[in-house]
Amino acid sequence: MTIREVAEYLKVNERTIYRLLSAKKLPAFKVGGSWRFRRTDIDRWIASQSEGEAGES
């Protein structure tokens, strides 16, 4: 997936994706100079975020 596709998938702005990348909070890798994402990694990241919020309550 590309930055744009991930932003659409997560329903956030592309700038938010770049912020998460710079904070090393989103699983990604570079191909050439472009960021790429695996949908399975993103889904796992979403699940871990949900678990983290549930544990904070």
Image: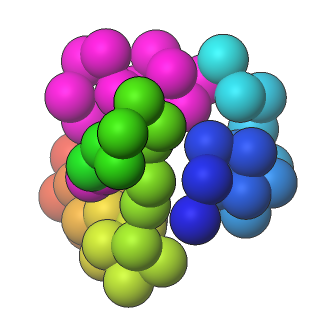
Q: Position of residue 32 (x, y in %)?
A: 36, 39
Q: What residue sits 40% from the left and 73% below the top?
A: 38
Say whether residue 19 is magenta.
yes
Question: Relative to 2, is 30 above or below?
Answer: above
Expressed as whole percent of the image width and height from the top left, the position of residue 49 reads: 33, 56
Q: Quadrant of residue 41?
A: bottom left
State the extent of the magenta-drawn residues as a range. 16-28
The residue at the point 20 percent across, 28 percent down is 24
For the question of whether residue 50 can be seen, the reply is no
In the image, taking residue 25 as reference, residue 9 lies left or right, namely right
- The image's colour scheme reads rainbow
Location of the N terminus by quadrant is bottom right
Where residue 23 appears, as percent x and y from the top left, is 25, 18
33 horizontally vs 25: left or right: right
Q: How many numbered discs sit on the rendered protein?
A: 0
Q: Is residue 28 left or right of residue 46?
A: left
Q: Is residue 47 covered in magenta? A: no
Residue furthest toward the front? 32
On screen, residue 13 above or below 40:
above
Which residue appears at 60% of the width and 23% of the height?
16
